[in-house]
Image: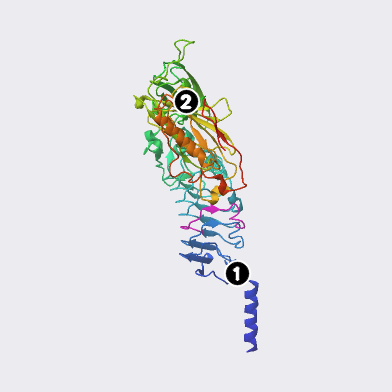
Amino acid sequence: MEAFYVTLRIALVFYVITPGSLSCPTGCSCTDDNLGRSLLCMETSMGNIPEDIPHDLRKVRIENCHLTELPQGSFSQVNALEFLWLNFNEITLMNIKSLEGLANLTELRLQGNKLTSVPWTAFQDTPKLKILDLKHNRLDVLPEHALRNLPVLTYLDLSVNQLSVISKDVFINWPLYQAAERAWEKEGLVSNVVIALHDNPWLCDCRLKGFVEFIRTISTPIILMNSYLKCSGPASKADKFFHEIQLKTCMKPVASAPETNITLPLGANASLTCLVKARPGPTIQWMYSLKIKRGFSVTENHIDAETVASQLVIPSLHLADRGLYTCMANNFIGNSSVSIMVDIPSFNSSAPLPPPVRMLSSGDNAFIEMRIAKQTVYGITLEWYVATDNPSETWFTIHFGKYDSPKKETIYIGPGINSYSVSDLLPVTKYEVCVTLKNHPPREGQCIVFMTGSDISELEQRERLIHIIVIVCAMVLAVPAGMYACTTEARFNCLERGVDLWRRRRRHGGNLQGAERQGTFDSLQANSEEGLCKDSEEKPGKERGKAEARPKGGSAAHLY
């Protein structure tokens, strides 16, 4: 009996000293075979590498266990590990030190994971690695020095990934390839190296030229598992095998234009053409000096495999379309550009330039009505209505800028559009926005002056979005009468006087104060801030000062 207790004590001491040699992670099995001790974990939702892996393992196989990453030192305590299979997991990230401590590793299989890249310098810790299986992943890049730290590799599987372009230097710089080539020349017999590269979306343009030529000339000791590599693009080479195509050297774009100076009359349609020759195909952009908010049409056509024609169409030339247009082309090698000058001659330097489309003169029977249709924290949306004989041919100009700025931004609006949004406004700033017929200066009644607020916390508490605190009620009169506004603190007599003025104008047939036509009144739409024109007596003792709104070219409407 005493001998039994002695044996038991020895066994317990041995277990305490070497806990990792006997334990096995939950849900896994540990076995011994001719390769040594092995760990097998299959279809277990562990999610992470177990921390209690025995230290004396020679083979680890963890498959379908939903692993998502290989962190640093994942198996650093298993120094004797030679075979590591982590197939069919969901590994997307591999730490650069994930193979730390695995100096004896000879086989690494990561088939069927979700790797988009591999830290190739991680293989500095696995100098004896001979088999690397990465098939059925999402690798899209293979750096030129990817294989530098794999000097004894005999099997590399990169099939069924997303590789489209790689350099032949990946293999030329491979120490094993260089050593094998020298040994083959001297002795005529060395160990073969098997490489699998099939079922990748190879893009067969000039960038793949060196690699395609390398594949054609590849020979022992390098053996391709499937030598029939196929192109996925471009369209002219899709589904063709490498041995069926001829690729040219890459070249940077060369841009040219059939015409570099174009002179056209106002209202004409202009077509600017740019020809670009490049390998691989270039990215083409058109630039022009003025920021014109109009929709220009750009089309591209392939003249041949290397030449692209880009055409910019400018409909109904305006004076603002005059200037220098630049066609810019670039690819990964370089860039090139060509400029085209567009000129619009005037008939007489002393006479006003003719409009690009039919414009209405001051004597035309035009009626303009506009309003602020929407107000937000960041800006306003302006709407207008114009009664003309030819609405389908009527263009407009939006003049927008700070009230005291002599130069306003001009935006040209085509027929059929009757709204425009102004955004990104600065706080506590007075602005002016005008709507005029195309190329006409602003007149009375065609402008709105407003000021943005400085504190929107009160409005936010009331769950409002309105940020404009000066223009609240708008009275829109027929051209050329002015537009008036009242502040949030203005008394109701502001609104009453506006209504009274409108009624008197109606009674006098639109002749009050020299006005030419009958006017209309239109307040803000119903979804605007309700109750903004309220009696200031609701907040006694709290005064925000006086505000003023002036119609363009008219007298001021003072607000109390």
SS assignment at label 1: helix
Mark 1, other Cα within 10 Å: few <14 / some 14–19 / many ≥20: some
Pick the quarter of the image with the N terminus.
bottom right
Q: Is residue 542 magenta?
A: no
Residue type at mark 2?
Gln
Which is nearer the eye, 558 or 257? 558
Which is nearer the eye, 11 or 326? 326
Residue 324 in picture, x, y percent from top left: 50, 20
Residue 390 in picture, x, y percent from top left: 34, 24
Q: Which numbered disc, 1 or 2, marks the residue closer to the eye?
A: 2
Q: Which residue is depicted at the point 54% across and 69% down?
A: 25
In the rendered view, tell whether residue 532 sits above or below residue 277. Answer: below
Asked whether residue 150 appears in the rendered view, the answer is no
Quarter of the rendering containing residue 78: bottom right
The disc, 1 or 2, on the residue closer to the chain's N-terminal end is: 1
The residue furthest bottom is 1
Q: Is residue 91 magenta?
A: yes
According to the image, label 1 marks what residue?
Answer: 20
Which is nearer the eye, 189 or 404? 404
Which is nearer the eye, 110 or 148? 110
Q: Which mark is residue 513?
A: 2
Residue type at mark 1?
Gly
Residue 79 in picture, x, y percent from top left: 61, 61
SS assignment at label 2: helix
- What residue span does the magenta drawing correspond to? 85-103
Left or right of 47? Residue 303 is: left
> How many numbered discs, if any?
2
Mark 2, other Cα within 10 Å: few <14 / some 14–19 / many ≥20: few
